[in-house]
Amino acid sequence: MNAKKSASRRSSKSDLARVDAHVVKAKEYEELPELTGAMLARAKINKGGRPVSANPRKLISLRLPPDVIDRWKATGPGWQTRMAERLSKVG
C-alpha cells in the first residue's frame, strides 16, 4: 500500500464534474437495452443491514454510578457485551 495514502480514503478515479455536466441526448437512450420480464426475474433486492436476530435485545434505561461505568469501560471494547453476560449469570 502507498504510505502517502490513508487506507480508508476512497477515490472513484472519475471526473465527476464532467459526468455531472453531461446532458443525456435522445440518441443515448436508444443504446439502452429494452427491459424485459426475464431481466426483472433475475433481479435481486439487497436491503443490506444485519440479519434479524432470533433473540433480539431490548432497550432499557439504567442509571449506574459513574465509577461502575468507568470500571467497565476500562476493560476495553465490548464492555457492554461483557456486562450483559455477567448480568445474565446473576439471574
Image (cartoon, grey):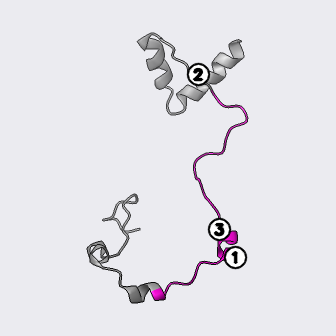
Position of 20 with respect to 33 (left or right) is left
Disc assigned to residue 83:
2
Q: Secondary structure at mark 1?
A: helix
Badge 2 marks a residue whose secondary structure is: helix
For the point 48% across and 11% down, the residue is 64
Q: Residue at x 47, y 88 (%)?
A: 30
Q: Is residue 70 left or right of residue 48?
A: left
Q: Is residue 52 magenta?
A: yes
- Vertically, is 3 above or below 79? below
Residue 79 in the image, given as x and y percentages of width and height:
54, 27
Q: CA distance from mark 1 to mark 2?
A: 52 Å
How many circles with numbers are drawn on the protein? 3
> Label 3 amino acid?
Ala
Of the 4 image quadrants, the one containing the C terminus is top right
Residue 43: mark in rendering: 3
Task: Find the magenta span and give its range.
Answer: 30-57
**Residue 12 horizontal/vertical position (percent):** 38, 70
How many residues crowd mark 3 within 10 Å: few (<14), some (14–19), many (20+)? few
- Secondary structure under the numbered disc 3 in the rendered image: loop
Is 49 included in the stretch rendered in magenta?
yes
Q: What x and y, as percent, mark residue 54?
A: 73, 36
Task: Say which label, 1 or 3, has the lower sequence index.
Answer: 1
* Amino acid type assigned to the residue bearing label 2 in the image: Met
- Place of residue 66 in the rendered image (x, y in percent of width and height, measured from the top left): 42, 13
Residue under pointer 1: 38
To which quarter of the image does residue 18 belong? bottom left
